[in-house]
Image: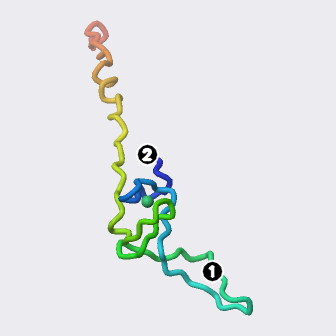
Amino acid sequence: MDVGNQYGYLCPNCEKGTDLLVTANAEVLLTSAGTDIDSSTSPVWNSKSFVDCLSCGWAGTVGDLRQASIKKEPASERAAEDSGKKKTPLDWRNHAG
Ligand SMILES: [Zn+2]
């Protein structure tokens, strides 16, 4: 189920997952022009990080977000196929030793 982010989070107010702005900690390099974000590291955030929904203006924490229910794929039909296979009957005529 694609809700707009790979974490499956939805705004609890407008139920959109495409406009969630999480306040995360990132490593930055101080430069003469200001700061450069270190793209080799991932920003750190958790359930207590602040979130703004840019769509409706809701503000809260990641822990307050709704988790989209992830539908499970239908069970594989492989089991049914296996049980439907014809079992090869033993050929007793070739058993003469
Ligand atoms: Zn919202």
Q: Quadrant of the C terminus?
A: top left
Name of the residue lying farthest toward the right: 32
Q: Which residue occupies the foreground of this view, 79 or 33?
A: 33
Label 1 element class: strand
What residue is disc 1 on? Answer: 37
Q: Residue at x 60, y 85 (%)?
A: 28
Residue count near mark 2 (Cα–Cα under 10 Å), binned few <14, some 14–19, many ≥20: few
Q: What kind of residue is marked 2?
A: Met
Q: Residue at x 36, y 52 (%)?
A: 68
Instruction: Point out residue 52 in the picture as x, y percentages from the top left corner.
Output: 46, 69
Label 2 element class: loop
Q: Give the vertical position of 92 relative to 11 (above or below).
A: above
In-image side of 51 versus 75 (left or right) = right
Q: Residue at x 35, y 29 (%)?
A: 78
Q: What kind of residue is marked 1?
A: Ile
In-image side of 9 versus 39 (left or right) = left
Q: Give the vertical position of 41 relative to 13 (above or below).
A: below
Q: Residue at x 50, y 68 (%)?
A: 21
Cα gap from disc 2 to disc 1, whole angstroms: 31 Å
Q: Tell me which label, 2 or 1, sits earlier in the chain.
A: 2
Q: Which residue occupies the foreground of this view, 57 or 32?
A: 57
Q: Are marks 2 and 1 in contact (CB under 8 Å)?
A: no
Report ligand 1 position as a quadrant: bottom left
Instruction: Point out residue 40 in the picture as x, y percentages from the top left corner.
Output: 61, 76
Name of the residue lying farthest toward the top: 93
In-image side of 65 versus 54 (left or right) = left
Instruction: Point out residue 16 in the picture as x, y percentages from the top left corner.
Output: 45, 54
Q: Quadrant of the N terminus?
A: top left
What residue is disc 2 on? Answer: 1
Q: Which residue occupies the foreground of this view, 83 or 28?
A: 28
